[in-house]
């Protein structure tokens, strides 16, 4: 999968992209992250990227010309077709989640535009951008961290990226529930024991315990998620039991 990243700060990306799973995915050709410095598409002596807002007010606005030129010259014909979405990272976008990550992971190529300054010229949004994504209801100084977050969440869903083929399937959110707790050796750490069921070797029991732990955690920490998930008969019974137990606490 190819990521085309348009940014004023390409230097913030390499340290993260050169680490761990993303590094390996890049080395193995599973992803290709291309960084494009929008500043290189300015033509005046001072490489002017921003200008004062029409109508007054504080802050500077990202100019349209270098952004259009950068994206059109990199994407060519793909810039005006649906072949490659052009995604603006902005607090005004749809809020990123696991299902958006899964949707984007199906595409061969996506473009990410990182905003900076007070805002971007509205004509970029209207006539160039095809999608807007926010990583949450707070405001950052720019879209670079959000772009890295998208790249990370999408990459780990691609085939062959994670060593364990079931790695992404059991994740928190992947199955619509928070993940069950994990333990490794030692079995006794400072008197805190690994639950017996995990040492039992009984895979049926372990599966059941994990499912119930995932349900319980989701019920306690993110009850909103339970409204969207497919629950089996036994899931429902378990939740009913939990509800009656926690009532009055
Ligand atoms: N740029 C600034 N804040 C942002 C956010 N919350 N999500 C995406 N892009 C942003």
Image: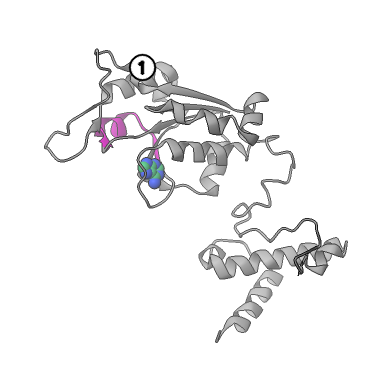
Crowd band around label 1 with a 10 angstrom C-alpha radius: few (<14), some (14–19), many (20+): few
Left or right of 176 in this view: 194: right
Toward the bottom, the furthest residue is 248
- Asked if the stretch drawn in magenta spans residue 120, the answer is yes
The image quadrant where one finds the C terminus is: bottom right
Q: Is mark 1 within 8 Å of ligand 1?
A: no
- Vertical relation: 57 (above or below) 52: below
Left or right of 56 in this view: 147: right
Corner quadrant of residue 48: top left
- Vertical relation: 3 (above or below) 103: above
Q: Secondary structure at mark 1?
A: helix
Evaluate whether residue 90 shows in this view: no
Q: Position of residue 70 (x, y in %)?
A: 37, 20
Give, as a single range, the part of the protein colored magenta. Answer: 119-133
Q: Position of residue 44 (x, y in %)?
A: 24, 13
**Residue at x 40% of width, y 22% of height:** 37
Corner quadrant of residue 62: top left
Q: Residue 27 or 175: which is nearer the viewer?
A: 27
């Amino acid at each position: 999968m190819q990521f085309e990243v348009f940014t004023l700060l390409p230097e913030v990306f390499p340290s993260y992209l050169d680490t761990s799973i993303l590094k390996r995915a890049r080395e193995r050709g599973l992803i290709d992250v291309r960084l494009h410095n929008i500043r290189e598409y300015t033509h005046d002596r001072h490489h002017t990227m921003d200008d004062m807002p029409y109508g007054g007010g504080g802050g500077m606005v990202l100019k349209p010309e270098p952004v259009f030129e950068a994206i059109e010259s990199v994407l060519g014909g793909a810039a005006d077709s649906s072949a490659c979405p052009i995604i603006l990272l902005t607090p005004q976008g749809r809020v990123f989640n696991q299902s958006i990550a899964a949707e984007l992971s199906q595409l061969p190529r996506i473009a990410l535009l990182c905003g900076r300054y007070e805002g971007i010229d509205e004509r970029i949004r209207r006539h160039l951008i095809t999608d807007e994504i926010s990583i949450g209801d707070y405001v950052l100084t720019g879209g670079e961290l959000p772009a890295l977050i998208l790249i990370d969440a999408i990459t780990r869903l691609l085939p062959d990226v994670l060593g364990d083929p079931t790695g992404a399937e059991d994740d928190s959110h992947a199955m619509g529930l928070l993940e069950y707790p994990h333990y490794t050796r030692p079995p006794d750490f400072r008197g805190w024991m690994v639950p017996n069921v995990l040492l039992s070797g009984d895979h049926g029991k372990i599966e059941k315990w994990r499912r119930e732990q995932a349900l319980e955690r989701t019920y306690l920490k993110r009850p909103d998620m339970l409204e969207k998930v497919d629950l089996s008969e036994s899931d429902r019974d378990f939740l009913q039991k939990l509800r009656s137990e926690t009532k009055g606490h």
